[in-house]
Amino acid sequence: MHELVFVALAGFAASFVDGALGMGFGPTSSTILLGAGLSPATTSTTVNLAKVATGVAAAVSHWRFRNIDHRLVIRLAVAGSLGAVIGVTVLANIDGKTLRPILAAMLVVVGLRILLRFSRPLPDADTPREGVDDYAHDPPSMPAFDQRGTGLVAAAGGVTNGLVGAWGPVVTPFLLHRGLRPRFAVGSVNTAEVAVAAVSAGSLLGALGGGGLDPGVILAMLGGGVVAAPVAALAIRFVPARAMGLAVGAVLLLTNTRELADWAHLSTGRWVAYFLVPVLVAIAALAPRWWPGRAAEPTS
């Protein structure tokens, strides 16, 4: 019972982070489940099944608050689903023991990517001006959005989603760097994630069957995630996200560094690796002070 409560709280936290930052549910959940001893295939299936339900709740919430661009959602969903099939194919054909350190290394990269994303100052809020709620209603108010490479990045995000549930950390920063407003980047990525997660979970169930899945874990994660989704969709409009992003990156780095240290049978070396994690987080946190000219993510 205590384990299920822990999973539910983890689902809430992961869904809140994902809904507010556009990333974090899959990597955070995968780290927890892999650390608990689940196989990579079972972890990916569980996480993606949970992401379908939490993703629907998040998509409805983002639609309600007009945080999505419908054409972009379709483009991301199609390319991401194709990439998910590739990721699942790899996952289904490689032994779990061989794959675990590879997945841990991928999650370390995701953690570094999140730290890099949040090493620059972010806006305190992304509240639209009155009457400016969607591209279709007021196109001139939006910055130029260069969509080149969007399909390729979405496909790459689909591959990592099929492997470790990492969709947002790959796709969301790319859209932000291309000039898309944060609320539309997060909302569109979260909405497209429903299709990508559904394809990932369906492909894994088709390839591996349901063996090893724990319905209690799935339901607990679903419960916590669904409750968090509307809270996160509202919070993104008013709450600064930088500290949360740095914390998520730190958790991913610390947890998966430990996994890699165990795999490599490190003794003294593991403490050096552990020490590097807070150093990297501190560098990311202090970066805006050291380079005050770095631009914040676009907000208008």
Image (cartoon, rainbow, N blue to C red):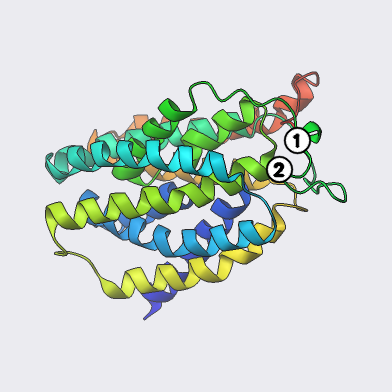
Residue 224 x, y percent position in the rendering: 49, 70
Label 2 crowd bin: few (<14), some (14–19), many (20+), radius 10 Å: few
| Horizontal side, residue 143 vs residue 224: left or right | right
Residue drawn 47% across the image and 52% down it: 25
Provide the residue designation for mark 1: 139
Residue 79 vs residue 260, the one in the foreground? 79
Disc sitting over residue 32 in the figure: none
Q: Give the residue number, with chain letter if any, for mark 2.
A: 136
What's the residue type where badge 1 is placed? Pro
- Rendered view: 126 above or below 297: below
> Please, what secondary structure does the residue beneath circle 1 have?
helix
Q: Residue at x 58, y 54 (%)?
A: 19
> Looking at the image, which is closer to me, 257 or 238?
238
Task: Examine the rendered structure and indicate whether residue 52 appears above or below residue 142.
Answer: below
Q: Are marks 1 and 2 in contact (CB under 8 Å)?
A: yes
Work out whether residue 77 or residue 94 is closer to the camera in this orientation and state it. Answer: 77
Amino acid residing under circle 2: Ala
Measuring 74% from the left and 28% from the top, which residue is drawn there? 143
